[in-house]
Every structure is written in structure tokens, then in C-alpha cells.
Amino acid sequence: MIVKVVIDIPAKQVNRSFDYAVPKDWESAIKLGSRVQVPFGNMKRTGFVVDITDETEFNGKLKPIHSIMDYDVFLNEELIELSDYLAEYLQCFRISVLQAMLPSLLKAKYDAIVQIHDPVQFSEKVGSWYQNETSIDRKVLEERISPNAISQLKKENIISIEYQVINQTTQKTKTMIKTNLNKDQLMNALEKTSQRSFKQRAILEYFINNQAIESIEKSTLMTELEVSNATINSAIDKEWITTFKEMIYRDPLKDVSFQTNSSKTLLAEQQNAYDLISQSVDNKQADTYLIEGVTGSGKTEIYLQLMDRALQQGKSALLLVPEISLTPQMVERVVSRFQTGIAVLHSGLSITEKYDEWQRIIKGEAKIVVGARSSIFAPLENIGIIIIDEEHETTYKQSDNPRYHARDVARWRSEYHDAPLILGSATPSLESRARAQVGNYHLIHLENRVNQMPMPPVDIIDMTQVELRETANELSPELIEKIQDRLDKKEQVVLLQNRRGYASYLLCRECGFIMQCPRCDISLTYHKFDNQMKCHYCDYHEPLPTQCPSCQSPHIRTHGIGTQKVAETLEEIFPEAKVTRMDNDTTRRKGQHQKLLDEFSSGQSNILLGTQMIAKGLDFENVTLVGVINADTALNLPDFRASERTFQLLTQVSGRTGRGRLAGEVVIQTYNPEHYVIQFAKTHDYENFFRFEMKRRHLTNYPPYYFTTLLTVSSKHQGRASQLAYDLKAQLYNPELERKEQLYIIGPNRNNISKINNYYYFNLLLKYKDKTTIQRQLDDILNNTQQKATQGVYVNINHEPQYFS
């Protein structure tokens, strides 16, 4: 038996598989996707088994694998095949993709412990050396018996392999009690036990009367029979009972209660969407559907009923949401509908919680997965439907290597399983909508809200006029009046300010000095809560100065506004109101998203203030006013998607109101009231915005008319980074392709923020019609720049980047 192993070294020279021999008594323990340790050069390296065969092209004698790292397989055959595709498609090293697919726990340092579930059978299998422990180190067991034997013990559930992050317990267990005596033996023991030993007799009587129960948790037995630990130990010494450890999963939903939520009757538009997509579920067709539905049109109910249809056919379902802030409400809806068999995967879980959820998926105990971007790699079998909610969100694109987009991975898995893929959004990305326009996706419109209420009216406030007639204030008199009206009516308000912190920057009024991050080319943001100036890129921070660091003037003031400052203003103007603030600062601790949303949902607070994390997916019936503090925050950024993102954000946040029986209203404050984005957002007019923006993209040769790839060169040495960027441009330049308008190279340009954490960044933007025209050159760049990395100059290849900074 021969295995092909991908070694965990992300480098050109080893970006392929290597053949290793498998000893005979290891063969049944090795599976596709297993992690193994192998001799590589004069070292031992970790690797992934990506193929099992009996043949090799290697002429010499193959080295045997050194050890097996896992007796569980975390990557199935599908994911191994997917890793090969993504490595080529993204032009990155295959090991980087394989590592990204693993649960986080396996990327940490950990110990492997063998938990013994059945000491009697275990002793019979392994021999006299076993001393009746409940757990032993895996290395000790591997010294005594072969990997094949260990694999068989695991298969028979006599043992399990559990992983413990060093200095941190990762597996939760409970102590179980069972008896190995039959009823006659228990009765005989009872006759020999003194009548005065009523506690010990109670234990014997329990097992006599409950023969059908195989085992019971120790704490439960002690509570039911009111017996002490000493009594239990005495019964163990007399060999009436035995104890063993049983693993229990950490449940991220254990503290949350859900009411049963049955299917709702679909409206005509919803029913039409359901009927179309269900045909693809039934016929196992890998069709892609784009549901373009206004906010509140009932997309989630369609998702749930389609998931139910897949489950009824014995299939599994995968549902992605873009942000952790959306996960609690979506999870609540899914669990309320299906109750069991649901795994949750998102960044708010601990490493061990994620691992436990991963285990439930592998063992088939969870048929539904709900989670954020990385959930697209969940090792589900027999997928019947894949759904990406709010498909336009940029968080579906991974910013670090490997830079995959969840939508592209979903399409591959959809074709692998012959399962439909659903993309849902009120404001689809221009790329997705353009694909639907030409028939690559099936386009489904939902133009009406399920509550039959109209889209809320939008009032545009020209802040240039407010500034002329009022003292500088982030809230216009019109918005203040409307907030007060809602508070008087006991209704709720959602306010969007897409910038966290208290103030954008600190300015000296005498010399004009602005406090900059010493590591990054950006100003520090003032956070009043802890009186610190902070960098949102490298996390540098220092105390707020009392005088200008440059000229020592005391006339140093904060400028710009963040969520902290707005919250303070709200508390001053509306002292009777309770404000819930949601941004990255208030949601860092685990469970804070859920806690803050519950606080607002239950009516404990009147105003929900936050960054873009509150703009989408949330559903609160009592919200009748949405206010956008500054609609221009991202409108004028040097990014061709700035207009699209602003329109999506304004439309999404507008949809948070009027979702119940009460009518809603939206107030948008802006310094650019005539801007086409503001005007289209005012009328909720996605169709005309799409047409207008597509014309601009066509004129400027941007997606969806061209593909884009961003090459980023970074180094602590500015000159080296700049020189390599120019060398790469010369290497890629093709006058014939440029003449035919098949390839444009923009740059090299400095990054929007030219220095981050002491690294200088230079960008090359490639715009092209056909990827095959530059495929070879990019492969060469990936391989040839390895030598540059040893000199501290790094090159990243990012296909279809979502940001250019």
C-alpha cells in the first residue's frame, strides 16, 4: 500500500505529492485525508494523504510513513479533490488550502488522549499490561499495539481519541456508571448485603429494577438515590458496578431556548420560487438561482422549506450567512424549525466548540450546517442544497491566503453533489446580477413584502444646510424630532454610523499636527471608553495626550465622529432612552452579539446604534425608524465598488424598519444629496441603479466586464518592494494583448494606506478578458518570488479582490 502525501511546507519545491510506503499493520488505519508524519529530508514533517494506491513512479525504495496523527479523518474525499481545484484556481500552494479546511483545534499544539469507554473489553483486547485506567496517552497505546488494532478498537467504540490543546482541556466528558452483573448476580449480592447498609442496597436495587438501562451518569445516580461518592466507590470496590468516561459535546446553543416554529403559508411569489428550486432538489440538478427579493420579502422562509425538502430526501443542507451578528437570528429560525441535527460554525465559537461541531458533522449527527464563510468547507456528505444569504457581502471573500470566495467554492460543491445553489439578496452584487442577466443563473424576483406593507419612505437630509443653520451636531433637528416621536410612542429606532470609536482623528489647532500610527500610514482613532488613541489596522495604542506631541500646544481636539461619540450624544439628548451600541469594540467578548440583540429585541433598549453589522438580516417588528448618521462614509473611497457598497448598505439598513404591523420610515443624512447613489436608495430602486452602475463599469473596464487580479508586493524595505513591483509589471506586460484590449495593467501604485505594521505595500491591478492569457505568467510569479521571500519581500496574488487597500 502506497500513499501520496502533501507536505506542510508552502513552497514551490514541494508543491506536489510525495509517495510513501505504509506498513502492513497500519493499512486499515490509513484513510484518504489522514494526517501523517513522514520523514522528509532529515526531518519529520506533517502531511495529508491525498491518494492511496498500489503503484509508484519512484524508482528507489520508498520510505515508510513515520506515524499517524489522527485516527479520525477530518477531510473527506470531496474536500481533498476540492483542495486540488482551489490550489490551481487561486494560484496558491495546495497545503495552504488543506490547512484552511481543517478545524482550528488541529492547527494548535495539542496532546492526543485515548479515552477508554469499556475497560473490560479493552483489557481483553490489549492484554495484562492494562491497569484499569479510564484514559491513557496515545503514544503509550501505540507502543503496545498496532495502528490497525487501535483503529479497530475505535471502530467498535471501545475507545475514542480525544485532543487536548496544551494547557487547555478540549474534550468535555462525563462519568458514567454501569453494571457487568446480570439480574441473578445482583439479587445474590443484595441478599448478602446487610439491611442496615440501605444506601448500598439502593444501588443494587436500582440496577435490578432498571435492567434495560445500559448506563447512567454518576451525578444523576447520586442525586436520584441520595448516595455519596464514598458509597459509589464502595460499590466499585465490590465489583458491582464500573465507571467509564463518555465524551459530551460543547453545545453553543445550550443557553438559548427556542420555540417550535412551523412552516408558514407561502405567498404567490414565494411559492413560485419554491416550486422552481424544488425541482432542482428533486432532480439533483446543480442549478444556481439568484433570488433578488426586497427586504422583508420572505427569503428565509423559502430557504427553510427548501432545506426541509432536502432533508426529507435524506440529504444534508448548508446555509451561509455573512457575519456573526446575523448568525444568532438565523440559527434561532433554523433550530425553531428543525429542532435537532444542526451544527453552528462561526468565529464567535471557541476552538473546542468548533471542533465538537465538526465532529458532529463528520459522524452524521448534524445534517444542517449554519455558519459564516469558512463553513463552506464543512465535511457534509450527500448535500442536497447550498444557500448563501446576503450573497453580495464582501465578508464571503477570504482576505488571507488562500483567498477564496465562498460563492466560488459553493458552486464547485453544488456541481459535485448535483445540488442547487441559492444566492439571496435584496441588492445582489453586480457580478451575480450580470450572470443572471445573461442566463448563467436563474433570476427570481420577489417584489413584495410578506406583511404586504410598502417599502418605507426615505427622507434625505442635506447636512450642508444643517451646518449653516445649526451648531455642528451629528444629528439633524429633523432626525432628533423623529427619534423623540418614536420614543414617545414606545417604538424602537435603529441608527447606523459606519465608523467605530469616539472620533476619527486628533488635530492640533495651532500647528495642524495629526496623531499618526508609528507603524502604519494612517491616523489614530480616539476611543473615549478607555481614553486611548488606537490604530484599527495593527492594534497599536497609546494614551490620549493632553498637549500636542509636536508643538506642545494645549489646543488639541478630536475631529470626526464614531459610534462612541454618537452614543454619548444620544444619551445627552434623550436621557430617558436606553441605547444599545453594536460595533467591533462592544462585541469582542464571546456571546456579546447575542446578548446585545436580545437586549434590543426584548425591549430593554429603545435605540440600536451600530456599524454595518446592524444593517442586514436583523428582524425587529417594533422598529419604525431607521436613521443613517452619515451616508457618505464610504461613498468617495478610491474603490470602483464604493458606490455599489454604499447603495447596498443604505438599502439593507432601510429594510430594518416596517417589518411588522407598524409602518416604518427612513432618514438619511448626507452632504451629497444629489449623488445618484443617494437618489436611487431613496426610491429603493435597485434595477435602475444596476443599469446605471453597469454603464460606468463598462466605460472603465471593470467587473463584470473584465476579470481582475491584484498583485500586492510588501516589504519592510520600501525600495525593494517598489523595485519588485516594477519588475513584475515588465514581466506581465504584453503590448499585443493591450492593443486588443484583452489586458490592462494599472500601477504600480502605493496602497491606499501605504504602510501597515511597518510593511510598505505596492499594488499592480490586472484587468483581463481571459484568465488563460496570464495563467502561465502568474504561475511563474508564484514560483519565482519564493526566493524574494527569503529576502523579506513578499508577493500576494488575489483574484477578484473585494478591496484595493
Image (tube, rainbow, N blue to C red):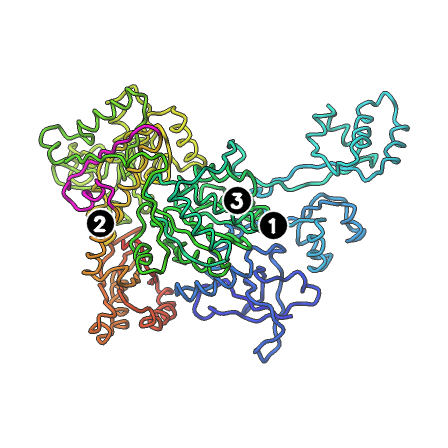
Label 2, label 3: how far apart the Cα atoms are: 40 Å
Secondary structure category for the residue under label 2: helix
Secondary structure category for the residue under label 3: strand
Q: Earlier in the sequence, mark 2 or mark 3?
A: 3
CB atoms at circles 2 and 1 under 8 Å apart? Answer: no
Q: Earlier in the sequence, mark 2 or mark 1?
A: 1
**Magenta region includes residue 329:** no
The magenta-colored residue range is: 661-685
| Residue 7, position as x, y percentages in the image | 52, 65
Q: Seen in the image, is 704 located left or right of residue 103?
A: left
Given the current orientation, which residue lies at the most extreme front position? 268
Q: What quarter of the picture does the N terminus occupy? A: bottom right
Q: Earlier in the sequence, mark 1 or mark 3?
A: 3
Q: Please say if 395 is above or below 503.
A: below
Q: Nearer the viewer, mark 2 or mark 3?
A: 2
Question: Which corner quadrant of the image does residue 461 belong to?
Answer: top left
Q: Which residue type does callout 2 highlight?
A: Asn
| Residue 518, position as x, y percentages in the image | 27, 47
Which numbered circle lies on residue 343?
3
Q: Which residue type does callout 1 highlight?
A: Lys
Residue name at image x 57 percent, y 64 percent: 49
Q: Which residue type does callout 3 highlight?
A: Ala
Label 2, label 1: how far apart the Cα atoms are: 48 Å
Which numbered circle lies on residue 363?
1
Residue name at image x 15 percent, y 34 percent: 553
Is residue 683 visible in the rendered structure shown here?
A: yes
| Residue at which label 2 appears | 688
| Residue 84, position as x, y percentages in the image | 47, 65
Q: Please say if 116 is above or below 237.
A: below
